[in-house]
Image (cartoon, rainbow, N blue to C red):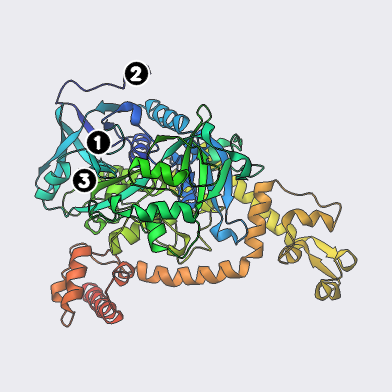
């Protein structure tokens, strides 16, 4: 790979930047791109240029609830959705049999193409330096960050820094009893940085994640396996892609069986998860195959997805078989599975244990409470997944730049975006295991759909300078078309003679509007042309949006009322330096939690685990009295 002039190790320590981003994973990529587009000078410090945007685990973007995050990142002007479209080789919408609130997009990606696209996106930016180095400490003056200290380059001055270290901080990889210091196979860990931060007062914890084996697809017998093709036509993540995506690969499904389970249980003492070797807490919602077999012993089988790693390789990713068993046991267990009797493993699965920072140490902007202008993003905040990391990197960069400009922070609340739900969960409730996004975490999920992410967030992205004028104009044109189409359906009357006999109540009215017909559960927007031959359908994206809005109008209005109630508590602000010591009668536990979390609003205060209604009422009474006293 040829390196541009921008890809270099800085030879002098006097170099200064607005923002330094530490780590080139999915959080780091979004942070660099957003900060640069908002006008900041940026340095990306990464141990390897070639590892920028690397997909450490599965070669896919999106999935249940994660697709919502990707759509929101795109609507705000972030990059992940566009990268997924460029590298995508299979596109599916999950949960399509359920309501639109839980439809979730997923793209199988070519791992190599995704890395290339991420790297090129950063190389195309002005005022960005890529520094191949490792950060060993941060420089602080008067509780504010003034720079970072790199192993090779010494002090690199910065007005703000975003730490996006992924799973690399003091990381150890486990395969059986073999332990190797590494953040990924073949890549060294970052040693000592979390210890330096702990010495400055940060609380550090330990988590664990894992990855399945990669296998040689030429050694798999696909004849008895279930093919899983993509959707036709495939739907892109990004509005920037203009629909230009193709399905170019097929995934397959197979299942474990009692023989496979027997091999695992008979060798469970060789698993680092069960012999005490691993101390970190793993993700409950993405368990290893050892966990599945032991904790769900009554299940005779577990689903495995064989997913291609790319177009120019036969390598497959065995989704559902995350493992840290010794390599020989992984091979034996896989060979007991239908279709994989002769399989060869190119790289065994492994577990990685790493340091993280409990996220209650952060403000809702993702700035640390302990050090001004230092932001944390991604898996170091206790999250799992590319999508959760990317959303945090984007939000950290936006807020870092806004603070440097002296502008108000950008905080999405729980009613505006899944990103808002996630960050509020992290900074208010904290984590005791790797956090994964689910639709069930969002109480306003009927409002927070994939299809309206642009409606909810594109205006913000444009205001922040991340969405171009041209794209914003196209967005406004789209929603004018949707509004006009809804009005057209409401005014277009269908005579009783054209209405099917099973809809007798409508026939008795003498006529019905197209909008009224569309409210009927089994009638879709495209069906409307059957009721009047002169009716011309709008483009598919307009029709889909209109169909959802009309069919779910009652539910959406009800949720809007709930959101209005929610907003009332969110508008009651708590001063940043508010003294909870003055609250006479407040429980000691509540006082301690309020002081630790430092909630910004009454709503956030109410969501702190262990806080009671009485605690919130006492706080509200005091805030009202304080406001009244000030006005008087």
Crowd band around label 2 with a 10 angstrom C-alpha radius: few (<14), some (14–19), many (20+): few
Give the mark, 1 or 2, whose residue is nearer the N terminus: 2
Q: Does the image show residue 212?
A: no
* Front-most of residues 622 and 304: 304
Q: Are marks 2 and 3 in contact (CB under 8 Å)?
A: no
- The residue that disc 3 covers is 374
> Of circles 2 and 3, which is in front?
2
The percent position of residue 186, horizontal first and vertical second, equals: 29, 31
Residue at 68% across, 47% down:
540
* Front-most of residues 596 and 435: 435
The percent position of residue 127, horizontal first and vertical second, equals: 31, 27
Q: Does the image show residue 544?
A: yes
**Residue 622, quarter of the rendered image:** bottom left
Give the mark, 2 or 3, whose residue is nearer the N terminus: 2
Distance CA(mark 1)–CA(mark 2):
20 Å
Residue at 17% across, 33% down:
157
Crowd band around label 1 with a 10 angstrom C-alpha radius: few (<14), some (14–19), many (20+): many
Element class at badge 1? strand
Residue at 23% across, 22% down:
9
- The residue that disc 2 covers is 3
Considering the image in quadrants, where does the C terminus appear? Answer: bottom left
Distance CA(mark 2)–CA(mark 3):
30 Å
* Front-most of residues 142 and 208: 208
- The residue that disc 1 covers is 20
* Front-most of residues 74 and 430: 430
The percent position of residue 288, horizontal first and vertical second, equals: 38, 52
353 sits left or right of 521 in the view: left
Compared to residue 534, the image places residue 4 above or below, namely above
């Amino acid at each position: 790979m040829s390196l541009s002039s921008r890809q270099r190790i800085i030879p002098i320590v006097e170099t200064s930047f607005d923002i330094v981003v530490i780590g080139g994973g999915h959080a780091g990529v979004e942070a660099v791109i957003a900060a640069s587009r908002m006008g900041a000078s940026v340095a990306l410090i990464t141990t390897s240029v070639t590892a920028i945007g690397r997909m450490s685990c599965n070669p896919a973007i999106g999935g249940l609830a994660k697709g919502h995050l990707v759509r929101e990142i795109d609507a705000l002007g972030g990059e992940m959705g566009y990268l997924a479209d460029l590298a995508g080789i299979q596109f599916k919408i999950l949960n399509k049999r359920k309501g639109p609130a839980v439809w979730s997009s997923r793209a199988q990606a070519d791992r190599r193409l995704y890395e290339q696209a991420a790297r090129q996106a950063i190389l195309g930016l002005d005022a960005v330096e890529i520094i191949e180095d490792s950060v060993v400490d941060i420089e602080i003056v008067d509780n504010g960050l003034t720079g970072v200290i790199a192993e090779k380059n010494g002090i690199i001055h910065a007005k703000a820094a975003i730490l996006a270290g992924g799973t690399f901080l003091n990381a150890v990889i486990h395969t059986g009893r073999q332990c190797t210091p590494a953040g990924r196979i073949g890549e060294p860990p970052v040693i000592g940085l979390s210890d330096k931060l702990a010495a400055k007062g940060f609380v550090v914890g330990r988590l664990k994640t894992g990855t399945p084996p990669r296998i040689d697809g030429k050694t798999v017998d696909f004849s008895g396996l279930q093919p899983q093709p993509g959707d036709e036509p495939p739907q892109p993540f990004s509005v920037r892609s203009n629909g230009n995506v193709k399905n170019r690969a097929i995934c397959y499904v197979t299942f474990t069986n009692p023989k496979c389970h027997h091999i695992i249980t008979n060798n469970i003492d060789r698993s680092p998860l069960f012999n005490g070797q691993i101390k970190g807490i793993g993700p409950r919602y993405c368990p290893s195959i050892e966990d599945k077999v032991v904790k769900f012993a009554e299940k005779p089988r577990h689903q495995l997805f064989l997913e291609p790693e790319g177009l120019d390789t036969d390598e497959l990713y065995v989704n559902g078989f995350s493992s840290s068993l010794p390599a020989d046991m992984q091979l034996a267990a896989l060979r007991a599975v239908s279709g994989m009797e002769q399989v060869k493993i190119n790289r065994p699965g492994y577990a990685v244990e790493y340091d993280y920072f409990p996220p209650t140490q952060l403000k809702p902007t993702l700035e640390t409470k302990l050090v001004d202008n230092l932001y944390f993003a991604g898996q170091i905040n206790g999250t799992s997944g590319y999508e959760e990391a990317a959303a945090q990197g984007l939000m950290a960069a936006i807020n870092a730049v806004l603070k440097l400009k002296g502008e108000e922070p950008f905080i999405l609340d729980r009613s505006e975006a899944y990103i808002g739900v996630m960050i509020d969960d992290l900074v208010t409730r904290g984590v005791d295991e790797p956090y994964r996004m689910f639709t069930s975490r969002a109480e306003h999920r009927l409002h927070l759909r994939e299809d309206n992410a642009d409606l909810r967030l594109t205006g913000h992205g444009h205001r922040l300078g991340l969405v171009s004028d041209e794209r914003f104009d196209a967005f406004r044109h789209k929603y004018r078309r949707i509004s006009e189409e809804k009005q057209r359906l409401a005014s277009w009357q269908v005579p009783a003679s054209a209405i099917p006999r099973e809809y007798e109540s409508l026939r008795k009215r003498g006529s019905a509007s197209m909008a009224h017909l569309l409210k009927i559960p089994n009638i879709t927007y495209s069906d409307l042309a059957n009721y009047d031959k002169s009716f011309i359908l709008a483009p598919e994206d307009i029709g889909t949006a209109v169909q959802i809005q009309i069919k779910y109008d009652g539910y959406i209005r009800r949720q809007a009322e709930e959101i209005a109630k929610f907003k009332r508590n969110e508008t009651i602000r708590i001063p940043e330096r508010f003294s909870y010591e003055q609250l006479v009668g407040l429980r000691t536990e509540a006082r301690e939690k309020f002081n630790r979390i430092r909630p910004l609003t009454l709503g956030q205060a109410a969501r702190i685990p262990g806080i009671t209604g009485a605690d919130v009422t006492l706080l509200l009474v005091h805030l009202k009295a304080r406001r009244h006293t000030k006005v008087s």
